[in-house]
């Protein structure tokens, strides 16, 4: 006879924890799918299917299943129960392999920063006793958790507190960096620790760990998002979703070329005056041309346009419409863009 671990649903008759809304606000879509599967498969004793069975049912990676089960255990909605069962030699070997894999996964993420390995999964979990010892012996962590709760506007359970401490200890971020990430998640209307964890890991994958670099990264992302909103309004796109090509094009104006909405509006106005309709690719040809000329500010561009018109006027005794000259120059740039990328849709 051997022992296997069964997941047990603790609340099946409506007697739910008082902080249920806080718990659910920290759960992502995958967590909720897994909890529903657990509840639907529970027997009269509350015992439900195994991690492998859930993985097969939902076609979800076992690591994701285990991460969600840890979350629900930390939230107090499920627990583990030992149940007697007969095991074959083969099943015992499988269990040992799976247990070893789970341990290596958690330890691999935990030591990722020390070993220079890029972490792509999640933060390794802490045991309750381990977490309590950390908070007791490192007072700054206790202060950090309190401040994190203030930023998020909610009380954190042990699982969430462990994730935030893991971002510090396992990925090498400092407390201020993590608090900035939490504040950013709140501004995005995703005040969940799991969401902040994903942001932190994505920054880590990019090699962005230093607090100042993280603040600069967040500022760039938010500035780009604001510019994108202004561009949508400029081109009259309303609330419709952008195509992949549109989003890539618009994002390149602020991130690749480094232009703000003031410069983009100048290019947009020239587009309307020239071809009498909003055409993002035509506007792009103008911006690309300015960038090639080393023009980076609205003042530089306005001076450049004046100098070009003045140069044309001085070079011709007869009257010549400088607007037509500028238009022809832009049209050549647009035609070159069309040959490379295709006609305007």
Image (cartoon, helix red, strand yellow):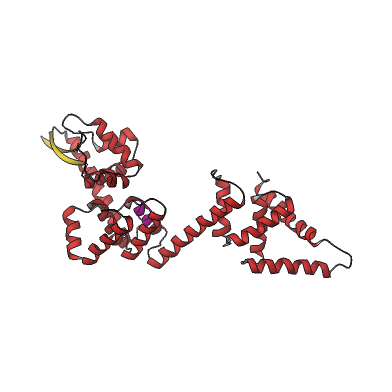
Q: Residue furthest right?
A: 318
Q: Is residue 199 magenta?
A: yes
Dominant secondary structure (helix, strand or loop) of the stretch shown in magenta:
helix
In the rendered image, the residue lying farthest to the top is 44
Q: Residue at x 32, y 37 (%)?
A: 33
Q: Residue at x 31, y 64 (%)?
A: 175
Give the side of residue 175 with respect to residue 87, left or right. Answer: right
What percent of the width, then of the height, locates residue 114? 30, 62
Is 177 colored magenta in this rendering? no
Does residue 197 appear anywhere in the picture? Answer: yes
Is residue 61 at all visible to an observer of this figure?
no
Which quadrant of the view contains residue 5? top left
Where residue 280 sits: x, y (%)? 64, 51
Q: Which residues are magenta?
A: 195-202
Nearer the observer, 36 or 88 = 36
169 relative to 314, above or below: above
Q: Position of residue 118 (x, y in %)?
A: 36, 56
How many marks overall?
0
Q: Residue at x 61, y 52 (%)?
A: 234
Residue 345 in percent (x, y) is at 65, 43
**Residue 181 picture quarter:** bottom left
**Residue sitting at x 28%, y 34%:** 37
Please state which of residues 95 and 306 is positioned toward the viewer in this rendering.
Answer: 306
Res 218 quadrant in image:
bottom left
Q: Which part of the image, by quadrant, shows the N terminus? A: top left
Q: Tell me if 199 is positioned left or right of 259 in this view.
A: left
Above or below, 257 relative to 160: below
Left or right of 222? Residue 1 is left
């Amino acid at each position: 006879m051997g022992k296997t671990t069964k997941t047990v649903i603790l609340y099946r008759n409506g007697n739910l924890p008082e902080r249920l809304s806080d718990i659910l606000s920290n759960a992502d879509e995958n967590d909720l799918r897994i909890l529903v599967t657990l509840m639907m498969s529970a027997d009269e004793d509350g015992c439900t299917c195994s991690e492998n069975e859930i993985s097969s049912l939902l076609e979800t990676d076992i690591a994701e299943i285990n991460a969600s089960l840890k979350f629900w255990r930390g939230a107090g909605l499920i627990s583990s129960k030992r149940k007697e069962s007969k095991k074959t030699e083969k099943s015992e070997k499988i269990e040992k392999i799976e247990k070893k894999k789970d341990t290596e996964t958690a330890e691999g993420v935990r030591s990722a920063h020390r070993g220079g390995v890029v972490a792509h999964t999640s933060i390794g979990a802490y045991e309750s006793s381990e977490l309590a010892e950390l908070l007791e012996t490192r007072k700054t962590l206790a202060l950090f958790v309190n401040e994190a709760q203030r930023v998020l506007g909610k009380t954190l359970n042990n699982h969430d507190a462990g994730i935030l401490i893991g971002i510090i200890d396992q990925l090498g971020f400092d407390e201020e960096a993590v608090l900035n990430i939490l504040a950013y998640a709140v501004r995005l209307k995703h005040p969940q620790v799991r969401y902040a964890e994903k942001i932190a890991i994505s920054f880590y994958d990019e090699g962005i760990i230093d607090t100042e670099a993280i603040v600069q990264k967040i500022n760039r992302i938010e500035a780009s998002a604001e510019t994108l909103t202004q561009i949508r309004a400029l081109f009259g796109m309303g609330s419709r979703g952008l195509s992949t090509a549109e989003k890539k094009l618009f994002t390149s104006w602020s991130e690749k070329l480094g232009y703000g909405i003031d410069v983009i509006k100048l290019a947009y106005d020239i587009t309307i005056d020239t071809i009498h309709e909003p055409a993002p690719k035509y506007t792009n040809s103008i911006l690309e041309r300015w960038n090639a000329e080393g023009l980076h500010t609205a003042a530089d561009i306005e001076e450049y346009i004046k100098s070009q018109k003045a140069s044309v006027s001085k070079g011709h005794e007869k009257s010549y419409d400088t607007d037509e000259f500028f238009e022809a120059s832009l049209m050549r740039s647009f035609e070159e863009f069309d040959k490379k990328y295709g006609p305007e849709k």
